Image (spheres, helix red, strand yellow):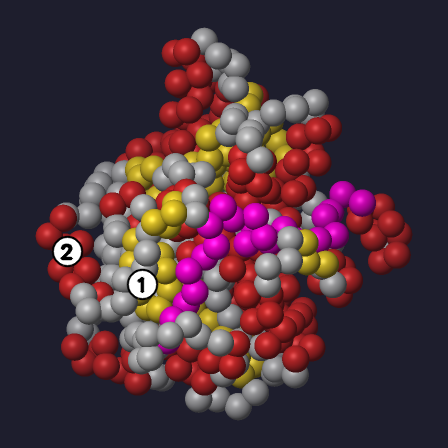
Amino acid sequence: MKEFKVFLREDEIPKQWYNIQADLPTPLQPPIHPGTGQPIGPQDLAPVFPMNLIEQEVSQQRWIDIPQEVMEKLLLWRPTPLHRAYALEKALGTPARIYYKNEGVSPPGSHKPNTAIAQAYYNKVFGIKRITTETGAGQWGSALSFACCLFGLECKVYMVRISFDQKPYRRMMMNTWGANCIPSPSKDTNAGRKMLEEYPDCPGSLGLAISEAIEDAVTSKDTRYSLGSVLNHVLMHQTIIGLEAKKQLEKFGEKKVDVVTGCAGGGSNFAGLAFPFVLDKINGANITIIPAEPTSCPTMTRAPFVYDFGDTAATTPLLPMYSLGHTFIPPPIHAGGLRYHGIAPLLSQLIIEGLIEPRAYNQLECYAAAVQWARTEGAIPAPETSHAIAVVIEEAKKAKEEGKEKVILLNWSGHGLMDLGGYDSYFSGKLVDYPLPEDVMQKSLKAIEGLPKPVAMKKGNPA
């Protein structure tokens, strides 16, 4: 049966991941050691990640082969379908043709297993027996729990406390796949205990959960840490989404895409769809590529481009990225996967280059967009995905005003069936908009004063 299944579908799935580092107009500035101020080397990352993933992180090779063992697991749900949103188009009265890549059909219900499967495999072949990680809304924790189950690895997940409380069924999913999920901040690590002493009612943050997971990994035997977004190799694993979408659009007879969008917290689902189209834009294509984020955590749209830690406890190397400051504690909005204080260095560089154009949306507008989607297309989107749907509706209305046909492509990054508490709060009027106050952002940014400064590069020249 497996041989028949592979024979039937393997030609629909890309055999390689796309590494955008090979095509950046300006190379990424390197992560640097916070103590020496010098670029870090592979050995500096070895206590945290297996060397085979570190090699992918720094690779400049354009195409990386997907191992057969990874491909066999991906075939459990890939290729994911590309749908046309006919009902939404009709409701909006738009001449735009709206397509969406449905990543919600994976067993955990999101795009996250695309890299979780790969990371579990590379850890397994490197001899690792246990993986630690963090999760915000629970999508990544669920995906890694699923992947570790498939490869026989132990998994411990530090889940941001506000999401742990809001979304108990995510924890139950992780438990079902054999993982141990606990709320962060926790009493299991020095970072967690310190935060609880200073702030007993802390709702948690992705940065803090990362600190706990890394501390656990480097102090435990046969253990490494796994990250669900931000890093180069993670975003590369996700490019299977965009590469599949290109093949599928050809079957629809579409020769050109005008708008590509996805939500962005750390950047993985957006990058997964967008990077193959960014390559087209680098080569002259006229495409508007839009990552969407919440106004309550406006990393791409308001934060400065800096060197900052990837975690709250300042244990990671310094990364060149747009950041609100590593001590930033985001408000407890329901789009938990978009609460990260920074954005991937690769996306940060693309913003500087002008290749992508980020937008921020208020929570209520996003829920209204999600409800309109559910009442036309049927499927209930995750709160994170609703930010990209807001872009789609905005662009579709613009096409109507201009009287122009457009092709809009959306990464429908996950379903919201585990997030119905947020919809209940929306319908009962409990949700409010929370654009991040300027004074709160400036207070958070004080944490990065004194850190090295990156050079804001654009198309090969200092900006």
Q: Amino acid at mark 2?
A: Gln
82 w.r.t. 66: above or below: above
Q: How many marks?
A: 2
Q: Residues within 10 Å of mark 1 (few under 14, many from 20)?
A: many
- Asked whether 343 or 430 is in front, the reply is 343
The label on residue 307 is 1
Q: Earlier in the sequence, mark 2 or mark 1?
A: 1
> How far separated are the C-alphas under marks 2 and 1?
16 Å
**Quarter occupied by the N terminus:** bottom right
Residue 88, percent from left and from top: 49, 23
Q: Residues within 10 Å of mark 2 (few under 14, many from 20)?
A: few
Q: Would you say 62 lies left or right of 157 here?
A: right
Residue 272, percent from left and from top: 55, 48
218 w.r.t. 296: above or below: below
- Asked whether 266 or 448 is in front, the reply is 448
> Is residue 231 visible from the viewing direction of this image?
yes
Comparing labels 2 and 1, the label whose residue is closer to the camera:
1
The image quadrant that residue 354 belongs to is top left
Is residue 305 within the magenta segment? no
Q: Which residues are magenta?
A: 11-33
Element on which disc 1 rests:
strand
Q: Which residue is mark 2?
A: 442
Instruction: Write the residue at 14% across / 48% down.
Output: 437
Instruction: Write the residue at 18% across / 66% down.
Output: 449
